[in-house]
Amino acid sequence: MAKKQFKAESKRLLDLMINSIYTNKEIFLREIISNASDAEDKLCYMALTDSSVGMSREDFVIRIDIDKENRLLSVKDNGIGMTKEELESNLGTIARSGSQKFRDEMEKMDDIDIIGKFGVGFYSAFMVSDKVTVKSRRYGAEDAWCWTSSGVDGYTVTPCEMDGAGTEVIMHIKSDTEDENYGKYLEQYTIQSLVKKYSDYIRYPIKLKMQRTRRVQSDDDKTPRYEDYTEDVTLNSMIPIWQRTKNEVRKEDYEDFYAEKFMRSDKPLRVITVIAEGQVMFKALLFIPGEVPYDYFTAEYKKGLQLYSSGVLIMESCEEMLPDHFRFIKGVVDTQDISLNISRETLQHSRQVKLIATNLEKKIKSELQRMMESEPEEYEKFFRLFGIQLKYGILASYGMAADTLKDLLMYYSSTEHKLVSLKDYVSRMSEDQKYIYYAGGEDIAKIDKLPQTEVIKKKGWEMLYLTDNIDEFAIQALREYEGKQFKSVNDDEELLGDEDKEKADKDAQQYKELLDFVKDALGGKIKEARISRQLISQPVCLTAEGGLSFEMEKYLKSFRREQSEEIMAQRILQLNPGHEIVSKLEQAVKEDPDRAKKLCELLYGQACLIAGLPIDDPAAFSQLICSLIV
């Protein structure tokens, strides 16, 4: 029979199919199996509406055969099959989808679920094959037809023999090259892996005759003897765990799925199931890991959820489904209500994608809040693992994610001596406390000893201790919680009552000569010296002014070392007028200015150490101390 030519536009598209549209060659098997599943769906539906078909769902099967010697890989179904005209129409014209036509005809039937949509997936076979043969017999027809093509050169359609209805796609796998090992698609292990990865949840069994070896009894009962045999193995699990009802799934089933699907050795801290109906329909199964992934803070870590369409894996890691602040979540989403590009490898940006992402974000937040309220110990474990990601989420979004994340935050409490939520903190505030007070530092013990915390402790107010390097950035992005502004303990003006402020104003005038001397003596190391009403036991402390705290300065310098001199918080040296050393300093200013300058340097060094800041010249500081002792 004479070879028929593809239409001109189809020829160009076929060339694109083979060389451009698909970026991953291994998905060809997904596409061929999906087409086989479509064909069986059609006949299965017909069996439901026509008793003469005489088949039940359990009768349908997809078979894969490997002929390694002849480099043939075939996928066969016992679905509805195609007539000669349908073969030419569906395979001779690229992008004409029989599945889509069937979908359009049955669009009012809610239980019909046809995977194929674009009518181009079949041609992905040419990425790994130099010749494709399709044998098909339409259900109810007596004759079968064979469609054969070696690519853009065209195709032939000839009569052939087939037992029963169905379609068989036979691919002659290309010869290996220096760049490509096409022979791997003739290996049992590769086929098993691809089915498990992409088509594990196709609703019909996918069977493969696998070569096995077993030990058999030898004649003399001593010499071991082995023989080869074939075994019909079902490669797919068919029903995804997220499609089962909750009473069908045990906790151990979720844990096994999590371990296998995401290659995890830990047990999930939380399992979240989602069934959404309405504007967009989808099911999701999400996991909060029980441990931080080893590569979580590296560039190699990929956020995102596995995206399925009708049980067929479309994307290994769909980033659009998760916001960055929940990037630790592992899981799957299964939906038909999204737009994919022609190769079904990437999403088209659409309203449906945004709806799914928004729905998932709300669900994750509500589950975390439920955990915080009903299982505080479990939530604290979660927060120690991933709490910093929530803080980064507030910072990265310039506060836009604050409403989503603020109720999930926890900080160490100076009075409760444990992690507490902002909601709990505010509920304990006394009537005379205007602000949510916080103090930053390297660890709890060091923060607790900061001199500027003493006056707040004396008042009996609760403070939040911020130990993560981004905490103060996040707090500044939040600005307030439930109408209560955040205030650093360094902001002494806000701690003073009217009477204290009057005393502070008098102190500024009384000690003006001393304060000017201290500032001049330190030669630009500080912006200003002040008399403080914050200090109780300590003679001095160093505070920051201008929006950049010392902890923020340390954080920025840690990765901007070339700009370290430019990144400096404005330093304010606060002196305690009630401390003996300040009285001696004041006396030295009048009687021995040189000694007074040394005392200023000493007090500044002490203040730096208390604040967790480095001494510029430790050796010189040591000599300074010695010079004041002798």
Image (cartoon, rainbow, N blue to C red):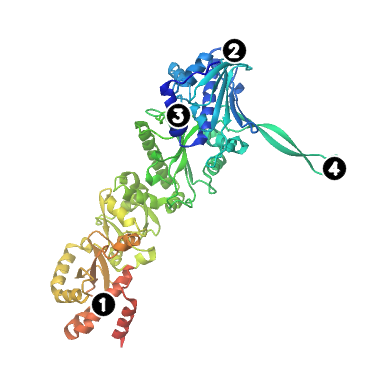
User: Where in the figure is residue 501, as x and y percent of width and height?
Assistant: 17, 65
Q: Earlier in the sequence, mark 3 or mark 2?
A: 3
Label 2 sits on a secondary structure element that is: loop
Nearer the observer, 395 or 27: 27
- Specify the label residue 143 is tagged with: 2
On residue 22, the disc is: none
* Of the image marks 4 and 3, the number of the one nearer the N terminus: 3
Quote the CA–CA distance across marks 3 and 2: 32 Å
| Number of marks drawn | 4
Res. 81 visible in picture: no
Residue type at tag 4: Asp
Q: Is residue 260 left or right of residue 354?
A: right
Q: Nearer the viewer, mark 4 or mark 3?
A: 3
Q: Which residue is mark 1?
A: 601
Residue occupied by mark 3: 15
- What amino acid does circle 3 point to? Asp
Residues tagged 3 and 2 counted as in contact (Cβ below 8 A): no
Counting from the top left corner in percent of width and height, residue 30 is at: 52, 31
